[in-house]
Amino acid sequence: MESNPFEVTKAVDFTDAQIAETFVPWPTGSVANPKSPMTQFLVGGKGGGRTHLMRHLSYSLQRERGSSVLQQIMADGYVGVYFRCSGLSGSRFSGRGLSKEVWQGVFSYYMDLWVTEQLLHVLADIQSRDACWDKHAEQIFSGAVSQVIEGSTLSNSVPVTDIPGMLALVAKLRRSVDVQVNNAAVKGEIQVEITSNPGEMIFGVARAVSQSLTGLENVVITFLIDEYENLNIDQQMYVNTLIREKQLPVTFLVGSRAWGVRTQLTLSADEENKRGSEYEWIELEEAYRARNAAYSNFCVSLVKGRLNLENQNWDEARLQKAFEKWDAEALAHRPLLSILKKYSPEERPHLARLVNSVTKATGNSELAHEFSAEISCANSPLVEKLSILRFYQDWSRARKLDSTTLAGAIRLRRDLLSGRSSKESEEYLKRWRSDMIAQVHAEASEALPYYGFEQFIEMSTYLPRSFLVVLKHVYRRDSFSGGRPFQAGQAISIDVQTKAVLDAANWYSVDSLPVGPMGDQCEIAIRRLGTFMNRYRYSDKPAEPGAVAFSTDLHNVSRSARDCLEAATTHGLLLEVPGGRIARDSGSRHKKYQLHPMIAPLYGLPTRRKGTIAFKSDEIDAFFAVGSTEENYSTIVEKRLASLIAPFGAYSHTMEALFDLD
């Protein structure tokens, strides 16, 4: 079996060479500017491409783009010093019987050493490759750096006259702090000699670079700080302080999940950094969404890069042809007839349910079979389903069964089969087509198909990793079944695509959960929400087509439900729809959320938003609140669905009022 070109989807798992090979520039220009004098926060959901972009901007990749490293950096106008906050092991700097103030001071000093060490690594590598600075320049630089860290017994013990020596010294200082931090729990104390003021080491060394090392005089030193969410609030406050008090030639580009930026407070008299003043906020998904066509082209380029097909004429149209699709015919005769071939026409599940529902309501089996015969259409299951839906809608409104109740369904059936449908019938078909096709699949115990290159792009909702994960599973399943994915003349089957989408949906639903108890709460909430939406969509008379979104004013919603709703949104389990929804009864604007398209297939739901369900506070609490029992959830759901299932709620009418045999 050939290796799967989509197997690796996380940038942290790539080598520098693989980052370079698979990097795709944004079609409309760079999303982030590494030379910007204003700090930039590059935020977004998991898998948005943030780490891939930041590593592409880093020195490790810069040095590979030219024959002379220094010349390349001078041409770029910046040098990117990349590091991940997970490497700082920020969780070590708390507790163990020591005060927050003690840990704040130790962490600040440790981070100064850490960041300075990363910069010195870059400088040492430049010198080893280009030998661009003479001994005198290195001595001047080393002397300037020594003054910044003056006072340490370690720094005074051995004179340092070159960049490698200075790197070794700072690394030794950093390791000495490591020893103290690691033994704090054993000793009950920590003794760290802090030899510089907060931030002084970083800015002082950067200034020495600009003043002492030829070629770097006009180069911006950009610290690319990734995985910022791994720092706690106090630690982020220190970084915010560096951002607020930064000095040329330093700038920062901070990468984080959107929820991971916990504060903009600083240690500078509790001043708060302001967006547009101290920093710029860049949301990757918003940048992609603003150029939807460009995002599609971006995804095409991602595939071409992974498949090494740049020298072949693979455009979006050709990629789309690599995936089998359903017959586009509006009434979907052939695929639905194929699904239902195991039933005789009169025994199709939807007709059997119609007969059963009418018989239960009227006690008259003969009448029920007459209704079924009037609606049935052996050659078009979709017309049958649409006609039955119309019948259920009229039955629910009229709250009785007679010949007039069936009239609308018969008229719709006639219009759709005539080939000269009225505008009303065409609109009805367009509105309910996908839901009725989904119901045919469910009633026949067949998986609802998910397929097509464009749908995979749409499902990702501007998170490239999600798109690549779908393709990873497509490639894996097709190869395992003996196919040759992306080979000319071979389309990947709908069955393979559907199973791959479900694989990706299962991955996403787990991968996106918050950690800890909130993750458990979100998992329950999304399962409950998805299950309800499934039952809503596959009910006899769904009130809204394609309902995969809900709205609420959050009035009287419990605090725990609000917190869970917020966590589910920030972690990408739900999408908040901009602008919300205006309530029909009061005119007030409600919050509106959509179940993430990557999760929707797990519940047989559409990946594109269409209808919206309005929820009351007790319903939101049933889904999202801590302590909401399964019994309470079930009671709320059954109450809400009663009006959607024939005979559409408990009626007080007498049997004579329900139907008329005349």
Image (cartoon, rainbow, N blue to C red):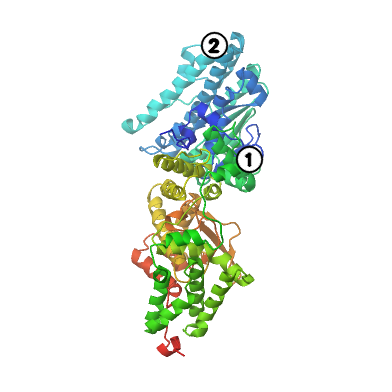
Contact, CB < 8 Å: mark 2 with mark 1? no
The span from disc 2 to disc 1 (Cα, nearest Å) is 37 Å
Left or right of residue 336: residue 356: left
Q: Which residue is mark 2?
A: 161
Measured as percent of width and height from the top left, residue 47 is found at: 50, 42
Let me know if residue 579 appears in the view.
yes
Measured as percent of width and height from the top left, residue 434 is found at: 52, 62
Q: Residue at horizontal 44%, vertical 66%? A: 538
Q: Nearer the viewer, residue 279 or 584?
A: 584
User: In the image, is residue 125 above or below residue 484?
Assistant: above
Dot 1 falls on a residue whose secondary structure is loop
Q: How busy is the neighbourhood of tag 1: few (under 14 within 10 Å), some, or many (20 plus)?
A: some
Residue lying at the far top of the rendered structure = 135
Looking at the picture, which amino acid does disc 2 mark?
A: Thr
Measured as percent of width and height from the top left, residue 46 is found at: 49, 43
Q: What count of labels does the image hold?
A: 2
Dot 2 falls on a residue whose secondary structure is loop
The quadrant holding residue 477 is top left
Residue lying at the far left of the rendered structure = 186
Q: How busy is the neighbourhood of tag 2: few (under 14 within 10 Å), some, or many (20 plus)?
A: some
Q: Which residue is mark 1?
A: 278
Measured as percent of width and height from the top left, residue 487 is found at: 51, 38
Let me know if residue 529 appears in the view.
no
Looking at the picture, which amino acid does disc 1 mark?
A: Glu
